[in-house]
Image (cartoon, rainbow, N blue to C red):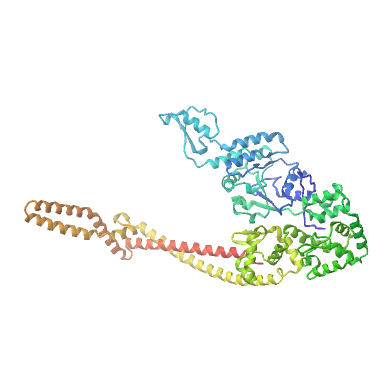
């Protein structure tokens, strides 16, 4: 019996597979009895496609587990993608379910629908509408009041002593989030828990997710009256491997994953019996379905039609009864899979025995074994399998084969193509896969492996730049590869471990060097900061107002302005022109005097710049005198530049250290 699996329920399709134990486990994660600041806020139900996640939640809502709790379920309902906060709130208003108090559903839905417009503050409304006293202004415009009231969903504006002035605001998102939360009943009003159920996270746009993360979650985390809101999602992977825009901000540290596995044999058996199947048919329903609810339902429907071929049944009974006990378990084990792949049968019969098992099977007299058109697999009719698997009970050899078959069978269900499984077998031992490890392990076949990973992304998950096999497949894949004794878990694992060990040596050495460098830099930075503090203290004690000073940029600009040279040139020209004017007759004397006066004027204009140039040179000269104010300022400026450069270098070293530490957390094996 598979004690590590779970069961499933589907009320909508009339599947009623009891899963009391799983529901109790899931309920124990929810803060139903006491909601505190430390309670988890995000719950992610994850598992393989078809395992029954949605139907599990549907049954959980109506189960005895939650019967005594007052839980308000909010499920956004929309036939299209939800692109804005308004659409999200409107969708939420269409999916209100309060089983303990159904009479309140309509009122809550209406309040939620109205909250699309945001929360109106008596002094500051949505869209940053400013309300001021009319006495402040002379020109009162009532139509502005009406426009402003309409923009936030109000039909009238009753405050005659106030005037509304419209403006471009930035608090619309915040007001919408507050209105959304205000529409939900408080814990103090008797609601134990408000569950925002998101069965299809992909339907919600990134803009809405950002709004929920940046506005709703912070508001819901503050104050004692908004702490009973949690989020429930359905995905195919744990939260850490979902897309980056699934982030719930400050609730990411309060997130819980719960994996939903296929149904165990006891649950499937009981379900099939309740549907009218015989005990033999009920056992075969599990073999056909592997615990997947929808397949189990189809198998039950076929079995209740009683269409088994009597000749095949009779032949199977005769053949099976003629076999020795040791061969009966082996034949029954061969009848567990839908398809028999010779090489992969090692997963059931141990390494190297798969092909021999097919040869043995084909040697049995009258065995209805058929080869597939592509000659890659064999099949045995369901009616023969039905007799073989039901004719052996409480056999340790058969139980051993069955335990090895189950993970292999579920892997075949998740990865139907044998060619895909073969490539996954090679990668099974790798915890994390990078391009460089593919190059080292697979040589000329590395490109094929990388192309497979790119083409079959549904079998892989990513975290940042690293890739690994999907968590949905990992456990069944590793068990199957171990049972097969495949090279992907033996020789390749050893090679990958060697590569990782070598890389760890390099990474740890680099980490040690970087930590030494940053320690040395920190000591140097501390000396610079201490000296800078001393200079600041000295400069404070100097009367900075006694001397004019310039900042380094202005100082360099003043030194290079050439105003002194231009003044000398202008004065020389003006002197020449005045002399020419004195010795010349009209009109040359007038022109000379005017031109000379103009050059004198230009000199006067350039004089402030010349003075700044002289000041700059004086400051530069004084800066060379140790202990002078200018020297201290120069040293302070140089220290500031060194501190800035040191901080940049420190940040870069810290970034490299974090990258190495992150890499060390993701070993190859």
Residue 565, percent from left and from top: 22, 61
- The residue shown at (59%, 61%) is 465
Please name whichever residue, 601 or 478, is drawn nearer the observer in this view of the structure.
478
Pinpoint residue 198: horizontal percent, then vertical percent: 66, 46
Say above or below: 356 vs 296: below
- Of residues 207 and 630, the one nearer the viewer is 207
Horizontal relation, residue 591 to residue 181: left or right? left
Q: Quadrant of the C terminus?
A: bottom right
Image quadrant where one finds the N terminus: bottom right
- In this view of the protein, which residue sits in the foreground, 424 or 515? 424
Q: Is residue 162 visible?
A: no
Q: Is residue 169 shown to the viewer in this render?
A: yes
- In the foreground, 390 or 198: 390
663 vs 30, left or right, is left
**Residue 278 percent coordinates (x, y):** 88, 50
Question: Quadrant location of residue 416?
Answer: bottom right
What is the total number of numbered labels drawn onto the structure image? 0
Residue 110 sits above or below residue 541 on the image: above
Q: Residue at x 82, y 63 (%)?
A: 401
Question: Which quadrant would residue 34 be assigned to in this image?
Answer: top right
Q: Position of residue 569 (x, y in %)?
A: 19, 59
């Amino acid at each position: 019996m598979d004690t590590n699996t779970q069961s499933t329920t589907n009320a909508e399709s009339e599947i009623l597979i009891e899963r009391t134990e799983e529901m109790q486990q899931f309920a124990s994660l929810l803060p139903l009895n006491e909601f505190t600041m430390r309670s988890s806020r995000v719950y992610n139900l994850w598992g393989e496609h078809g395992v029954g996640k949605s139907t599990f939640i549907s049954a959980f809502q109506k189960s005895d587990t939650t019967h005594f709790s007052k839980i308000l379920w909010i499920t956004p309902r929309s036939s299209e993608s939800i692109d804005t906060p308004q659409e999200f709130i409107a969708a939420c208003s269409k999916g209100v379910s309060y089983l303990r108090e159904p009479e309140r559903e309509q009122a809550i839905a209406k309040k939620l629908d109205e909250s699309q417009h945001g929360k109106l503050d008596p002094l500051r409304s949505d869209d940053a509408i400013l309300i001021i006293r009319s006495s402040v202004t002379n020109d009162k415009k009532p139509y502005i009041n009406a426009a402003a009231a309409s923009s936030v969903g109000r039909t009238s504006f009753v405050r005659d002593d106030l005037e509304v002035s419209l403006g471009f605001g930035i608090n619309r998102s915040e007001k919408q989030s507050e209105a959304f939360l205000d529409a939900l009943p408080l814990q103090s009003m008797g609601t134990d828990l408000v569950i925002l159920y998101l069965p299809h996270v992909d339907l919600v746009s990134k803009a809405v997710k950002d709004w929920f993360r940046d506005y709703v979650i912070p508001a819901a985390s503050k104050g004692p009256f908004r702490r009973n809101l949690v989020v429930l999602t359905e995905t195919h992977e744990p939260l850490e491997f979902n897309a980056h825009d699934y982030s719930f901000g400050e609730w990411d540290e309060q997130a819980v994953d719960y994996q939903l596995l296929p149904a165990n044999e006891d649950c499937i058996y009981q379900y099939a019996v309740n549907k009218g199947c015989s005990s033999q048919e009920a056992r075969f329903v599990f073999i056909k379905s592997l615990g997947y609810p929808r397949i189990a339902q189809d198998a039950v429907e076929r079995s209740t039609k009683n269409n088994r071929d009597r000749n095949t049944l009779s032949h199977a009974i005769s053949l099976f009864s003629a076999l020795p006990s040791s061969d009966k378990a082996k034949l029954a084990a061969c009848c567990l899979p839908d398809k028999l792949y010779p090489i992969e049968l090692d997963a059931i019969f141990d390494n190297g025995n798969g092909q021999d098992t097919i040869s043995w099977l084909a040697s049995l007299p009258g065995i209805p074994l058929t080869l597939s058109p592509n000659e890659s697999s064999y099949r045995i009719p369901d009616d023969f399998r039905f007799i073989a698997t039901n004719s052996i009970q409480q056999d340790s050899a058969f139980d051993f084969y069955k335990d090895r078959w189950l993970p292999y069978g579920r892997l075949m269900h998740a990865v139907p193509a044998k060619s895909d499984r073969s490539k996954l077998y090679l990668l099974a031992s790798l915890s994390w896969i990078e391009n460089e490890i593919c190059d080292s392990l697979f040589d000329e076949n590395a490109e094929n492996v990388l192309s497979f990973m790119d083409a079959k992304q549904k079998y892989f998950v990513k975290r940042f730049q690293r890739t690994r096999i999907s968590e949905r497949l990992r456990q069944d894949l590793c068990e199957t590869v171990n049972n097969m004794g495949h090279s992907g878990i033996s020789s390749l694992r050893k090679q990958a471990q060697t590569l990782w060990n070598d890389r760890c040596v390099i990474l740890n050495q680099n980490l040690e060097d970087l930590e030494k460098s940053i320690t040395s830099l920190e000591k140097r930075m501390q000396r610079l900061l201490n000296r800078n503090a001393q200079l600041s203290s000295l400069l404070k004690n100097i009367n900075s107002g006694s001397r004019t000073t310039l900042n380094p940029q202005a100082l360099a600009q003043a030194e290079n302005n050439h105003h002194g040279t231009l003044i000398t040139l202008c004065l020389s020209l003006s002197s020449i022109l005045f002399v020419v004017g004195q010795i010349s007759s009209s009109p040359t004397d007038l022109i000379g005097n005017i031109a000379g006066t103009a050059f004198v004027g230009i000199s006067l204009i350039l004089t402030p710049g010349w003075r700044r140039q002289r000041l700059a040179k004086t400051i530069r000269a004084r800066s060379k005198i140790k202990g002078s104010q200018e020297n201290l300022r120069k040293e302070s400026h140089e220290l500031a530049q060194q501190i800035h450069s040191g901080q940049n270098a420190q940040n870069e070293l810290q970034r490299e250290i974090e990258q190495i530490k992150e890499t060390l957390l993701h070993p190859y094996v």
